[in-house]
Each structure stands twice: as structure tokens, then as C-alpha cells.
Image (cartoon, rainbow, N blue to C red):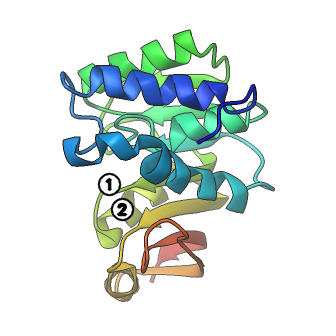
Amino acid sequence: MTVSRETDPLEKYAALIRKWNPVINLVAPSTLDQVESRHIADCLQLVTISAKARGPWLDMGSGGGLPGIVLAIRRPDLPVTLLESDKRKGSFLRTVARELELTNVQIISERIESARPLFSSNISARALAPLPLLMSYVHRHLDPRGRAWLMKGRNWQSEVEEARKIWSFQLNAHESHTHPGAAILELTDIRYA
């Protein structure tokens, strides 16, 4: 990754992940040398796909801030809330927000199912839970007219089939350019089937 003024915050973020990862497992240790090329590049796809999104954004189960921090860096116009129950990861996220001067970021250290409904216009999640369970979290926190952006692995199609047994939704699947077979699921009109 070439360092420029535009990507400098992403480079600082990658450095913070590398610094904290031995103490708090933010990314799999086997992928630590691929922070930019795998994790951040994966999240930048979401930034591009969701370029027209407006309104409050909630990143559920933020962990190390992927994709929430990347989104906040590249979309300073959006208020981004990071919902992460692990207090240590919450401390990491607060450090990142402070050191990168991300004034558009708020961190909530609560469980997704316990936090008061946030009615966000947009919700994202990456590697959080199987889609049928994830849909209940999305439904709890998404504005009825909102949009969910869910980053799913190779089994996303079977997860969609399972979720449709309980949930009704409109789906636009965006093929991942960083993980063959993976997709970013753009969901709207989410309700019980």
C-alpha cells in the first residue's frame, strides 16, 4: 500500500492494530502481516459500495474496528457508532478514535441484544454471527427505512436461504474482490417473514 496524505490515517490504524494485537486478539495472528491487503482492503470495498449512504451508521460487534473505523476515516461526514461489548476492544477503539482524531466516532461498550435500539440508517457487521441470528440484531437497531451492509464469507448463499425461513428482505449481493466467493450483502425492507 502506498502511503499518501489520503491513506495516512489508514496506515496509522494498521500500525495500531499491529501494536495491540499481541495483547488483544483484534485479527487472527496468522493474518497480521496482511492488515492492509486483506482486512483494510476488504473494508474499503464497503466504503465504495455504500458511497451514497447517508445518516447515522452503526457497526455492530466492531471488534478491532473493521469495518467501522475504516468507514469513519473515509466518510467523516457520517456519524459512526461502534457497538462492541468487549471492554478491552472498546479501549482499543477509543484509543484509535483519539489518536486519529475521529470526531465522528462514538463507542458503546454493551452487548448488541442489550443496548437500547439505535434506529440507525445504516448498519454494518463483519464476521459477527450467522445470518439468521445477525438479522435479529439488525432488526433491533435498524431504522425501518434503513439499509444493512453485512460482510459474509463463502457460505453466504446458504446463510441467506436459512435467514429467509424467518425473515423477509430485499437483497443485493456485492461480490467481494478480496475474498473469492465472499460477498457484501446489502439488505433493505427487513421484517419477519
The answer to which of 99 and 188 lies nearer the viewer is 99
Residue 101 coordinates in the image, percent (x, y): 63, 13
Residue 111 placement: quadrant: top left
Indicate the amino acid at tag 1. Leu
Q: Which mark is residue 134?
A: 2
Q: Quadrant of the C terminus?
A: bottom left
Residue 164 coordinates in the image, percent (x, y): 40, 85
The reply to whether residue 108 is in sight is no
Q: Quadrant of the N terminus?
A: top right
The reply to whether residue 67 is in sight is yes
Q: Identify the secondary structure beneath mark 1.
A: loop
Indicate the amino acid at tag 2. Leu
Q: Which mark is residue 65?
A: none
Residue 93 coordinates in the image, percent (x, y): 42, 23
Tag 1–tag 2 contact (CB < 8 Å): yes
Identify residue for label 1: 128
Q: Is residue 78 above or below residue 122?
A: above
Q: Residue at x 67, y 40 (%)?
A: 56
Q: Residue at x 43, y 69 (%)?
A: 179
Q: Is residue 188 left or right of residue 66?
A: right
The answer to which of 181 and 88 lies nearer the viewer is 181
